[in-house]
Image (cartoon, helix red, strand yellow):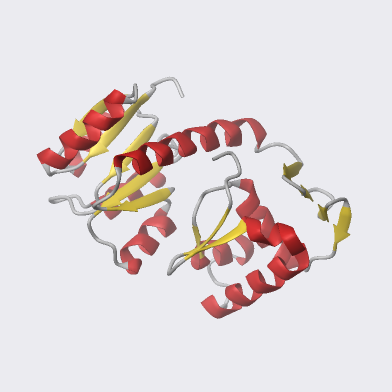
Amino acid sequence: MSNQHILVVEDDEDISQLISFHLQREGFSVKNAASGEKALDSIYQNPPEIVLLDLMLPALGGLQLCKILKNNPKTENIPIVMVTAKGEEDDVVKGLEIGADDYMVKPFRPRELIARIHAIRRRSSRNGATDSKDSIEIENLEIHKGKREVFVDDESISLTYTEFEILQILASKPGWVFSRYQIVNAIRGEDYPVTDRSIDVQIVSLRRKLKGAGQLIETVRGIGYRFKDTSL
């Protein structure tokens, strides 16, 4: 992205300054916004590389702001990390389903926040360069999207349609957390009748068929699944 800076959207001045201090010490350029409205103005004027977004904001809340950004073609590709004191699963799931890319629950370790941001920057760079590729190769796993073929240690693995789609979705964005709803919606569309349990069953079967490579699919407790980011 052309504007290499991070926007911190946080109404608590002490927390905002603390986050900014650690980001600036790491070499990032940082802007701050104490409300959703100010954040929107800043983003439209100078789109940031990443948005760190608190959910509990006055007036225009974090979830609403996230939805606005992800529904706008000009801002939909800006990674959003939810940084919130609310650890309830429902809030995290809602944010991820709207389009947030990651989340952290306060209190958090500054080193972890920095590591998450570096990981998102690497993924964004990698995805921008490789999204058009017809194959994915991670460790001993090969996925050929056009041919719908999967190999582990050069051994062909037979997958069902749904298993292949789940694997492709997760492996296309290593490290990104996908809720069960997001997985279902990506595969079948919003009207497909399926339960959380059915996704869990598919994941169990997929891991078993992938043998050792199955450990690349990680469970995010209470949220969903992600593919291990081996670059970390």
Residue 230 visible within the image: yes
Residue 24's spot in the image, x, y percent? 28, 24
Residue at screen point 58% across, 74% down:
200
* Nearer the observer, 207 or 196: 207
- Position of 51 with respect to 20 (left or right) is right
* Nearer the observer, 6 or 193: 6
Residue at screen point 64% across, 50% down:
171
Task: Pick the quarter of the image with the C terminus.
Answer: top right
Residue 222's spot in the image, x, y percent? 43, 69
- Position of 10 with respect to 44 (left or right) is left
Residue 195 visible within the image: no
- Position of 13 with respect to 202 (left or right) is left
Residue 229's spot in the image, x, y percent? 57, 46
Residue at screen point 37% across, 36% down:
114
Residue at screen point 28% across, 49% down:
108
Residue 1's spot in the image, x, y percent? 46, 24
Height in image: 10 above or below 220? above
